Image (spheres, rainbow, N blue to C red):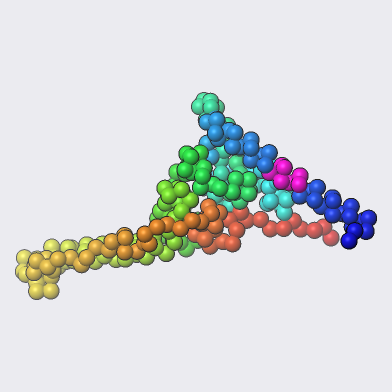
Amino acid sequence: MELPQPQAEEAVSSNDRVGKKQRDREEEAGYIMDDLKSGKSVLLLQETPKAKTSHCQSWRCMPRKRTGKPVIKSHYRFMLKDISVPSKRKAEYYHVTCLERLLPDLSALVRDGHLKMDGWISAPVDSNVCLESSAEMVADWFKYGGRTFDLGCYANFRKDHREWDNDCSTRWINHHLGHGEQPDNACNYCQSLPDPEEPKKEDYFPDDPSVISLSQMLASMSGQANIDKCGRRRRRA
Protein backbone atom coordinates (compact mmCIF):
# COMPACT_ATOMS: atom_id res chain seq x y z
CA MET A 1 0.00 0.00 0.00
CA GLU A 2 1.46 3.34 -1.08
CA LEU A 3 1.28 6.33 1.23
CA PRO A 4 -0.38 9.54 -0.02
CA GLN A 5 2.21 12.03 -1.27
CA PRO A 6 2.25 14.37 1.80
CA GLN A 7 2.50 11.40 4.19
CA ALA A 8 5.23 9.79 2.11
CA GLU A 9 7.28 13.01 2.12
CA GLU A 10 6.79 13.35 5.87
CA ALA A 11 7.95 9.76 6.44
CA VAL A 12 11.06 10.31 4.32
CA SER A 13 11.81 13.56 6.14
CA SER A 14 11.46 11.83 9.51
CA ASN A 15 13.77 9.02 8.41
CA ASP A 16 16.31 11.57 7.20
CA ARG A 17 16.29 13.31 10.57
CA VAL A 18 16.77 10.02 12.42
CA GLY A 19 19.57 9.06 10.05
CA LYS A 20 21.31 12.41 10.50
CA LYS A 21 21.10 12.13 14.29
CA GLN A 22 22.68 8.70 14.13
CA ARG A 23 25.44 9.87 11.78
CA ASP A 24 26.16 12.89 13.99
CA ARG A 25 26.27 10.68 17.08
CA GLU A 26 28.68 8.24 15.43
CA GLU A 27 30.88 11.06 14.15
CA GLU A 28 31.09 12.79 17.53
CA ALA A 29 31.73 9.50 19.33
CA GLY A 30 34.47 8.76 16.80
CA TYR A 31 36.28 12.01 17.57
CA ILE A 32 36.19 11.31 21.31
CA MET A 33 37.36 7.71 20.90
CA ASP A 34 40.22 8.80 18.63
CA ASP A 35 41.45 11.21 21.32
CA LEU A 36 41.19 8.52 24.01
CA LYS A 37 42.85 5.72 22.05
CA SER A 38 45.68 7.97 20.87
CA GLY A 39 46.52 8.81 24.47
CA LYS A 40 45.89 12.49 23.81
CA SER A 41 42.99 12.66 26.27
CA VAL A 42 41.55 10.90 29.29
CA LEU A 43 37.93 10.87 30.45
CA LEU A 44 37.32 11.73 34.11
CA LEU A 45 34.18 11.46 36.22
CA GLN A 46 33.98 14.43 38.58
CA GLU A 47 31.73 16.05 41.12
CA THR A 48 30.65 19.31 39.50
CA PRO A 49 32.23 22.34 41.24
CA LYS A 50 29.71 24.86 42.55
CA ALA A 51 31.94 27.87 42.02
CA LYS A 52 32.39 27.65 38.27
CA THR A 53 29.83 27.06 35.52
CA SER A 54 30.58 24.39 32.92
CA HIS A 55 28.82 23.78 29.62
CA CYS A 56 28.15 20.45 27.95
CA GLN A 57 29.94 20.10 24.61
CA SER A 58 27.71 17.36 23.22
CA TRP A 59 26.41 18.29 19.78
CA ARG A 60 22.93 17.12 20.73
CA CYS A 61 22.88 17.96 24.43
CA MET A 62 19.43 17.00 25.72
CA PRO A 63 19.27 19.57 28.56
CA ARG A 64 20.14 22.27 26.01
CA LYS A 65 17.38 21.00 23.73
CA ARG A 66 14.87 21.18 26.58
CA THR A 67 15.98 24.34 28.38
CA GLY A 68 17.94 26.22 25.73
CA LYS A 69 21.09 26.09 27.87
CA PRO A 70 23.87 23.47 28.01
CA VAL A 71 24.83 24.36 31.60
CA ILE A 72 25.73 21.30 33.69
CA LYS A 73 23.63 21.63 36.85
CA SER A 74 23.84 18.05 38.05
CA HIS A 75 26.10 16.83 40.86
CA TYR A 76 28.32 14.93 38.40
CA ARG A 77 29.95 15.62 35.07
CA PHE A 78 32.52 14.19 32.68
CA MET A 79 35.70 16.02 31.83
CA LEU A 80 37.51 15.08 28.63
CA LYS A 81 40.99 16.23 29.61
CA ASP A 82 43.72 16.89 27.08
CA ILE A 83 46.90 15.39 28.55
CA SER A 84 49.09 15.74 25.45
CA VAL A 85 50.52 19.05 26.70
CA PRO A 86 50.80 18.99 30.52
CA SER A 87 51.49 22.72 30.73
CA LYS A 88 48.15 23.57 29.08
CA ARG A 89 44.94 22.91 30.98
CA LYS A 90 42.53 22.16 28.15
CA ALA A 91 39.29 20.29 28.80
CA GLU A 92 35.76 19.74 27.54
CA TYR A 93 32.79 18.91 29.76
CA TYR A 94 29.75 16.70 29.26
CA HIS A 95 26.57 15.70 31.05
CA VAL A 96 26.89 12.07 32.15
CA THR A 97 23.77 11.07 30.21
CA CYS A 98 24.88 12.97 27.09
CA LEU A 99 28.19 11.12 26.97
CA GLU A 100 26.51 7.82 27.79
CA ARG A 101 24.37 8.24 24.66
CA LEU A 102 27.52 8.73 22.61
CA LEU A 103 29.55 5.96 24.28
CA PRO A 104 27.09 3.43 25.76
CA ASP A 105 29.75 0.93 26.86
CA LEU A 106 31.53 3.02 29.49
CA SER A 107 32.63 -0.13 31.30
CA ALA A 108 34.93 -0.95 28.37
CA LEU A 109 36.54 2.48 28.73
CA VAL A 110 37.18 1.75 32.41
CA ARG A 111 38.80 -1.60 31.62
CA ASP A 112 40.98 0.00 28.94
CA GLY A 113 42.10 2.77 31.28
CA HIS A 114 40.40 5.57 29.32
CA LEU A 115 37.79 6.41 32.00
CA LYS A 116 38.81 7.16 35.59
CA MET A 117 37.57 8.76 38.79
CA ASP A 118 38.78 12.26 39.53
CA GLY A 119 39.05 12.40 43.30
CA TRP A 120 36.25 11.69 45.76
CA ILE A 121 32.88 10.78 44.18
CA SER A 122 29.88 10.29 46.46
CA ALA A 123 26.16 11.02 46.78
CA PRO A 124 25.09 14.66 47.19
CA VAL A 125 25.12 15.88 50.78
CA ASP A 126 21.35 16.49 50.71
CA SER A 127 20.50 12.99 49.43
CA ASN A 128 20.16 11.38 52.91
CA VAL A 129 22.60 8.67 51.77
CA CYS A 130 25.76 7.77 53.67
CA LEU A 131 28.57 9.54 51.80
CA GLU A 132 31.14 6.86 52.66
CA SER A 133 28.86 4.04 51.46
CA SER A 134 28.07 5.80 48.18
CA ALA A 135 31.76 6.58 47.63
CA GLU A 136 32.59 2.88 48.07
CA MET A 137 29.86 1.97 45.60
CA VAL A 138 31.30 4.29 42.95
CA ALA A 139 34.87 3.14 43.62
CA ASP A 140 33.80 -0.50 43.19
CA TRP A 141 32.07 0.34 39.89
CA PHE A 142 35.44 1.47 38.57
CA LYS A 143 37.32 -1.36 40.30
CA TYR A 144 35.10 -4.04 38.75
CA GLY A 145 34.76 -2.40 35.34
CA GLY A 146 31.11 -1.35 35.30
CA ARG A 147 29.86 -3.63 38.09
CA THR A 148 29.15 -2.89 41.73
CA PHE A 149 26.98 -3.93 44.68
CA ASP A 150 23.64 -2.60 45.89
CA LEU A 151 23.95 0.50 48.04
CA GLY A 152 22.15 -1.29 50.88
CA CYS A 153 25.03 -3.77 51.19
CA TYR A 154 27.48 -0.98 51.94
CA ALA A 155 25.07 0.88 54.22
CA ASN A 156 24.11 -2.18 56.29
CA PHE A 157 27.71 -3.28 56.76
CA ARG A 158 28.83 0.21 57.79
CA LYS A 159 25.92 0.58 60.22
CA ASP A 160 26.54 -2.75 61.95
CA HIS A 161 30.31 -2.28 62.02
CA ARG A 162 29.94 1.20 63.49
CA GLU A 163 27.64 -0.14 66.22
CA TRP A 164 30.10 -2.96 66.96
CA ASP A 165 33.01 -0.52 67.13
CA ASN A 166 31.10 1.87 69.40
CA ASP A 167 30.10 -1.00 71.68
CA CYS A 168 33.70 -2.23 71.99
CA SER A 169 34.95 1.29 72.68
CA THR A 170 32.30 1.81 75.37
CA ARG A 171 33.17 -1.49 77.05
CA TRP A 172 36.89 -0.61 77.04
CA ILE A 173 36.31 2.87 78.47
CA ASN A 174 33.98 1.53 81.17
CA HIS A 175 36.56 -1.13 82.07
CA HIS A 176 39.23 1.50 82.72
CA LEU A 177 37.13 4.34 84.08
CA GLY A 178 33.85 2.87 85.20
CA HIS A 179 34.85 0.66 88.12
CA GLY A 180 38.48 1.56 88.77
CA GLU A 181 40.59 -1.30 90.08
CA GLN A 182 37.61 -3.23 91.45
CA PRO A 183 36.73 -6.23 89.23
CA ASP A 184 33.21 -6.22 87.81
CA ASN A 185 31.41 -9.47 87.08
CA ALA A 186 29.52 -7.77 84.23
CA CYS A 187 32.73 -6.53 82.57
CA ASN A 188 34.00 -8.60 79.64
CA TYR A 189 37.57 -7.49 80.21
CA CYS A 190 37.52 -8.28 83.94
CA GLN A 191 36.14 -11.72 83.18
CA SER A 192 38.52 -12.21 80.21
CA LEU A 193 35.56 -12.70 77.89
CA PRO A 194 35.99 -12.13 74.14
CA ASP A 195 34.52 -9.08 72.46
CA PRO A 196 31.40 -9.56 70.34
CA GLU A 197 32.34 -10.90 66.91
CA GLU A 198 33.32 -8.22 64.44
CA PRO A 199 30.94 -7.98 61.44
CA LYS A 200 32.53 -9.49 58.33
CA LYS A 201 32.14 -7.76 55.00
CA GLU A 202 31.61 -11.01 53.12
CA ASP A 203 28.45 -11.64 55.15
CA TYR A 204 26.85 -8.51 53.72
CA PHE A 205 27.80 -8.77 50.06
CA PRO A 206 26.98 -11.34 47.37
CA ASP A 207 29.84 -13.20 45.72
CA ASP A 208 29.75 -11.13 42.54
CA PRO A 209 28.88 -7.48 41.80
CA SER A 210 26.07 -6.66 39.36
CA VAL A 211 26.23 -4.83 36.04
CA ILE A 212 24.70 -1.35 36.15
CA SER A 213 25.08 1.71 33.94
CA LEU A 214 26.96 4.63 35.43
CA SER A 215 24.04 7.06 35.10
CA GLN A 216 21.65 4.57 36.71
CA MET A 217 24.01 4.00 39.63
CA LEU A 218 24.56 7.72 40.21
CA ALA A 219 20.82 8.40 39.99
CA SER A 220 19.97 5.62 42.44
CA MET A 221 22.35 6.86 45.11
CA SER A 222 21.27 10.47 44.53
CA GLY A 223 17.57 9.68 44.91
CA GLN A 224 16.76 11.10 41.47
CA ALA A 225 15.03 9.74 38.40
CA ASN A 226 17.55 11.51 36.17
CA ILE A 227 20.90 12.83 37.35
CA ASP A 228 21.00 15.60 34.74
CA LYS A 229 18.31 17.92 36.04
CA CYS A 230 16.51 19.69 33.24
CA GLY A 231 13.01 21.02 33.01
CA ARG A 232 11.24 21.73 29.76
CA ARG A 233 11.57 25.11 28.12
CA ARG A 234 8.65 27.39 28.91
CA ARG A 235 6.42 28.32 26.02
CA ARG A 236 5.83 31.96 25.33
CA ALA A 237 2.32 33.19 25.99
Instruction: State left or right for residue 221 relative to residue 190.
Output: right
Q: Position of residue 68 (x, y in %)?
A: 73, 49
Is residue 50 in view?
A: no
In the figure, 104 relative to 41: above or below? below
Q: Residue at x 94, y 55 (%)?
A: 5
Q: Nearer the viewer, residue 21 or 11?
A: 11
Q: Position of residue 123 (x, y in %)?
A: 48, 56
Q: How many marks?
A: 0
Instruction: State left or right for residue 169 relative to residue 9.
Output: left
Q: Residue at x 45, y 51 (%)?
A: 141
Locate residue 174: give its quadrant: bottom left
The dominant secondary structure in magenta is: helix
Q: Nearer the viewer, residue 7 or 24?
A: 7
Question: Which quadrant of the rendered structure holds the C terminus?
Answer: bottom right
Locate residue 202: give its quadrant: bottom left
Q: Which residues are magenta?
A: 19-25
Q: Which residue sits furthest left?
A: 182
Q: Residue at x 56, y 40 (%)?
A: 79
Q: Which residue sits furthest bottom?
A: 185
Q: Which residue sits furthest right?
A: 5
Instruction: State left or right for residue 143 relative to residue 187.
Output: right
Q: Residue at x 47, y 43 (%)?
A: 111
Question: Which quadrant of the rendered structure holds the N terminus?
Answer: bottom right
Q: Nearer the viewer, residue 178 or 36?
A: 36
In the figure, 104 relative to 90: above or below? below
Is residue 214 in view?
A: yes
Instruction: State left or right for residue 107 relative to residue 63.
Output: left
In the figure, 2 relative to 20: above or below? below
- Is residue 21 located in the magenta-colored stretch of the structure? yes
Q: Position of residue 27 (x, y in %)?
A: 68, 38
- Is residue 38 located in the magenta-colored stretch of the structure? no
